[in-house]
Every structure is written in C-alpha cells, then in structure tokens.
Amino acid sequence: MSDLTIVTGIWDLGRERAGSGFERSFDHYKTRFAQLLAADVPMVIFGDEALESFVHEMRGARPTSFHAKPATAFREHFDFYDRVQEIRRDEAWLAQAGWLPQSPQATLPLYNPMVMSKMFMLHDASIWNPFRTQHFAWLDGAITNTVHPGYFTHDRVLSKVEQFLGKFFFVSFPYDGGSEIHGFAREGMRRYCADDPAFVCRGGFFGGHIDCLAEVNEHYYGLLSSSLHDGCMGTEESIFTIMAYEEPGLYDRYALREEHAGLLAHFFEHVKSAPEVAPRAAPVVGGAAKPARRRLRDVDISQKTVAAYVVTFNSPNQLAAVLEGWTREFAFNRLYVLDHSTDAQARQANAQVAQKYQAVGLSHPKGNGGICGGRQFVAEHFARTTDDYCVFLEDDMLLNDPADTGVCRNGLRRGVPHLREVLLKIMELEEYDFLKLSFTEFYGDNRTQFAWYNVPQKVRTQRWPEKPHLPAHGLDADAPRTRFDAIGTVDGVAYIDGEVYYCNWPQIVSREGNRRMFLDTVFEHPFEQTWMSHMYQLTVAGALRPAVLLASPVTHDRFDHYGAELRREN
C-alpha cells in the first residue's frame, strides 16, 4: 500500500447560486469526485453523511476512511465564520475587483470557511492516520475539473508524488499585477510577505511528511487568524503564499511556469515523467529528531540504579502503607522520605517508619514545602546523586499487588509483575525522559489531554484550533484527546508515547529528563498546572519525550485524611 494518504471531500454549498460565471451544480462536483475516487490510493474522505454510500460505492475495496462532516460544520465549528461574513459583505472589500462581487467568496457564506478548513482537515487526518502512512496530501474533490483523471488512474502519479513531500509542499504559479490576490489586498500581502509576492501557492494540492503537519497547521492558523482580524481576506491560497514567503526554509515549492496558466495538470505531468526515487528523510521540525529505536536485546539494566522519594504529611499510617507495598515489590537502590509533617508526634512516628524500611529522612527548608515544592526539592536532590533514575511518590499512591488480575475502569491491567525490570527496560530501550506508571488516575486518565486546560491561550488556539475555548465552569466533557505516537511492549507490558501530559502521579524519570523538566527552568512558586503547561510545550517542541504505561498498577488511597486548609502546593 502507498505511504501516502490522500485527504479530500466535497460539499453542497449552493454553488449553483454563485454569481454569473461561477455557477456549478452539485451533480457536476459528484461526477468529478467519482473520477478521483477511482484512484487506488488510501483516502480519508470528508463529506455530508448522505455522501457516505456514494463514496463506498465508488471506492469499492480501496482503502477508505469516511468521516461525516456536514456543511453546517463550516458555520458552527469554524472559528472565524462571523469574521468571514463581515468581510465578504464589506463594500470596500467587494470593490477591489470587478469579478469579486460575483465570486463564490462573496456570494456563498460557507465557501471561504470550507476552503480555509482544508488545512485543518489534513491535520485531523494525520492525527487519526488510519492507514499508518508517513505522508499526507490534500487533493480537491473536483480536481479532475482541470486535471485529466487518467493521471490518477492510468498513470498512477499519486504513487510517485511522495518524493516531493519530504518537507511541506506547495505548487505555485507566477502572479503579477492586480490590487488584490483572490480578494486579499495587495498592500496586505506585501506587509505579511515582507515583499511584493511574485507567486501564489495553489490550494488544490498540498501536503507533506507527517512530522511537519502540526507545526504547519499552527503556522497556518496563526496567519489566518491575524489576517482576518486585520480585515484581509482572500482564500486559503493567499495564506499559503504568505506561509511560503514567511518561512521559506519550512516549505518546498514546485514553481509552474507562466505559460502553464497556473494549472495543476502541468505539475502532475512533471510527476508522471519524473524518475521514481525514495522519499527524502523527514525534516526536523520544532526540535530534535527522535532517537533511533534500540533493540531490546541490546539493553542491559544490570547496573542501573533507581532512587525513590516519598513525600508524606502528618500520617505515619499512610507512610507505612505506601512503603510496605512498594518496597515489597520494587527493589529501590535508595529510598528517601521527605517529611512535611507539621505535627511533632507524626514526625517522630514517621522517622520510626522510615527507619523500619531503611529509608533516609529528608527535610524541606520550609518545613512543609507542599506537594510541588517537595517535588522541586526532590528534583534538585536527585540531581546531586549518582542514581540513574528516580521515582516520586506521594504517601497515598499505593502499588497494586502484581498478582492482581483485575482491570481499571479503562480495562487495563492493575497488576504488573517485575515492575522495576519492565520500567528500566522501557526507559533504556526508548530513552524517554519520563514514563508515567499509571494510565488511569484518580481524577481522570491519559486519554484526555489535561494540558489543554493549563497552557496559555495562544498555545491553546494554535494546538487545538477546533477547540480554542475553555468551559466557563468545571471540566469539559468534550476536552481534546491526547495525541499519541507509538505503542511498544516489553515483557508483555504495553506502553505508549506522544503528547503525554505531566502530573504528580508516580513516574520514573531519567537524569536527563529530570534536568529538562525541573532544572533548566525553575519556577519560584511551582504548581502542578504550571509544570503541566511547561512540559507539554517542551514535548511538542521535541525537547521532551514522555510516555505512559498501558496499565494502571497504582491506586490512590487517602484513608487518613487531614484538613483541606493544611494542604500546600509550595
């Protein structure tokens, strides 16, 4: 199967009601779409629910993933719908060119919201990645209106186009003259491009390697937002052109010649005649490249050491419970107890419990440094030791019996035998910065991306353009899901990496991860939410590699409660 997923779709936007010279029936679009659907390449297809049976009839057994997206979604879920409507009705905007008042941009309320959403649909498809491909490209549903369908069926150019998609790729055509570009004021284009643009990037075909798409999507969203805010509006092609001018190192471009009249058919003719070569390596976007995966048989954990840090407060019984379970099943090389107790009798009893389990007692300079203050203290203490890894525990984080055959509420195993060996093998094999020990937590689980609640609004808007706003109160029942990358297994225990959020639940942390997480940037008054935001941004920038077990061997059990007024964060 091809290593390229084509993303496409059509909608009935009422094009037959467009201005003179721009009218087309939806049947015309369906006829052209059927010609494209004959291409034997994996496709992610968007459209109204009524289109699904037509798609499957035309596609037959070809690899197809249909996603119902009604045309009304471009009104209800496109962030800039209202702004688009304001601009398309503006007399000054309409007066820029004689053709503009008759154009679909001006006459059809959903036209620009749809074409401006192509990039978002491409990005969504890359997240779902149903065919596990490395390359994604948008191809207009009615592309055969200007490109002969034989290019996609007889000539099979889509099987050769991957070689152009090492970076993110546009096809451009020369553009000279005019006071606007597709309705985007020329003056505005000069301001955004820092130049007078000599070309325009096509919107009928564009795409790239999967590793590029998140950053490109952010770049696109930011420019779309700022330009519409400034009252500048063309189509998606205007934004693509600005992107290519603004970040030329991020994008590859095939430049059509003037005599090609901007027709994509000439690009596909070039692809048809080009020699088939191996695709280029993926570019490094937004951070370091992922390290090559080692083989498990090359991993030696025999000399690796793990230190455990347990923070406790006013409850010798809680401390005894957590130490009993963990020390019975997990052979720590060193064990520390950080006692935040404000009760003198509890401190004395905690010291006796620590001595029983051969733990070294530690004290925070503030006495009670709080949960996050204690976590920062642990990070700084661990950095001064020689151990390879550390595990941070609160005194209510109890380890399940490894013989437990039950499952958590997400259906994942509760008992994990030989947990120490499994964790060390995973960390050595994958070179993660931190590995969370439990997929299911007390307040939620790692399916939901809780960093969404805590990142700055700019980051939230860039990373989740389809979900940029927090709920007015409480949690959102439809909060964004975590974007995962790859699943692995060690000794029958599965784990998954990707944009795994940080929280204070138990995790094993490497020395390098400890530095990146807590020491390169130190917050004077740390909170769990601050760290979650900070580490998420490091992760998406490629500067931090987290993962989480697909198991839930830790149970939160606070059986000895204290007053809420005594809790401190730092």
Image: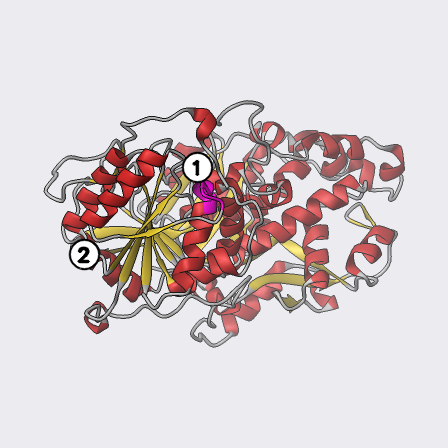
Residue 558's quadrant in the figure? Answer: top left
Nearer to me, 280 or 164:
280
- The answer to whether residue 563 is above or below residue 126 is above
- The answer to whether residue 332 is above or below residue 304 is above
Task: Provide the secondary structure element on which disc 1 rests.
Answer: strand
Q: Name the residue under label 1.
A: 67
Q: Visible in this render: residue 404? A: yes
Residue 559 at x, y percent in the picture: 27, 27
Of callouts 2 and 1, the N-terminal one: 1
Report the number of discs.
2
What segment is highlighted magenta in the picture?
366-373
Nearer to me, 358 or 77:
358
Three-letter code for the amino acid on which mark 2 is drawn? Ala
> Dot 2: few (<14), some (14–19), or many (≥20) neighbours within 10 Å?
some
Three-letter code for the amino acid on which mark 1 is drawn? His
Q: Name the residue under label 2.
A: 331
Residue 292 at x, y percent in the picture: 36, 70
Please report the residue visible at 39 percent of the width from the left and 54 percent of the height from the top. Answer: 546
Indicate yes or no whether the magenta region holds residue 407: no
Q: Quadrant of the N terminus?
A: bottom left
Q: Visible in this render: residue 208? A: no
Residue 355 at x, y percent in the picture: 22, 49
Residue 446's quadrant in the figure? Answer: top left
Nearer to me, 264 or 79:
79
